[in-house]
Image (cartoon, rainbow, N blue to C red):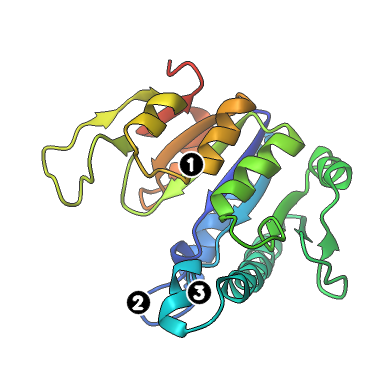
Amino acid sequence: MYKRVLLKLSGEALSSKDEIFDKDVLDDIANQVKTIVNDGVQVAIVVGGGNFVRGRMADDLGIDRTQVDSMGMLGTVINALAIQGALERHGVLTRVQTAIDMTKIAEPYIPRRAIRHLEKGRVVVFGAGTGSAFFSTDTTAALRASEIKADVILMAKNGVDGVYDSDPRINKDAVRFDSISYMELLQRELLVMDSTATSMCMDNNIDLLVFNMNEKDNIIKAVRGEAVATRVSKEGK
């Protein structure tokens, strides 16, 4: 079992067809994280903002990309607060830290303070991405995992149980990898995470575990090494 993990969630994972937030999903995530924390694992979380806005929407909206990315960063803070609320409702001590100062609702991101919270058994949720435009929350996850010295990034995917050689939702003959190197990921142009995040994980020798979060208790199983998943690492073993 890992000592310190960073869980990467998409914003869309928190929503349902009709609602921005699905209470059942938030409760399920909170219950699983509570179990992991009770097992003695330190948990940090990075959440996306795709249930609100994405950078690629800039052209459709006719708004500058930098502004749209700023909108997305604010969306991640809303999601971080929703996760904090769900965790605290289940009795899990939680802190939200943001890359953009908004001290009335969250702490500023300070790596040493984040590590101290983790050491005290608190979950830390990182909001506002990197604080800069043109960087995804995948890159945020790689950056924060490097800064807090996480053992692994748990990449929770919706409906996909690992890395495939092609899109399994399109190609029924797609083959899943049990393990793969970051270099092969880049060479094959497999879009598990963006190239900046992939390179950062490779350079800092941080493993990535890609699994399906829609399977029951799969976050817990991923931490315990029991989930069907793909391990991405520098060596690919």
Camera sees residue 175: yes
Residue type at numbered disc 1: Ser
Q: CA distance from mark 3 to mark 2?
A: 16 Å
Residue type at numbered disc 2: Lys
Q: Residues within 10 Å of mark 3 (few under 14, many from 20)?
A: many
Q: Is residue 103 left or right of residue 227?
A: right
Location of residue 29 in the rendering, given as x and y in whole percent from the top left corner: 53, 56
- Secondary element type, mark 2: loop
Residue depth check, mark 1 versus mark 2: number of the one nearer the observer: 1
Q: CA distance from mark 1 to mark 2?
A: 30 Å
In which image quadrant can residue 227 be found? Answer: top left
Q: CA distance from mark 1 to mark 3?
A: 21 Å
In which image quadrant can residue 185 be found? Answer: top left
Residue at which label 1 appears: 195
**Toward the viewer: 58 or 172?**
58
Location of residue 133 in the rendering, given as x and y in whole percent from the top left corner: 64, 63
Q: Residues within 10 Å of mark 1 (few under 14, many from 20)?
A: some
Residue at which label 2 appears: 17
Q: Residues within 10 Å of mark 2 (few under 14, many from 20)?
A: few
Mark with earlier residue (1, 2):
2
Q: Residue 225 bears which disc, if any?
A: none
Residue depth check, mark 1 versus mark 3: number of the one nearer the observer: 1
Work out whether 79 lies above or below 92: below
Q: Is residue 93 left or right of residue 87?
A: right
Q: Residue 53 bears which disc, if any?
A: 3
Residue at the (42%, 38%) spot, across then down: 210
Location of residue 52 in the rendering, given as x and y in whole percent from the top left corner: 51, 76
- Secondary element type, mark 3: loop
Camera sees residue 1: no
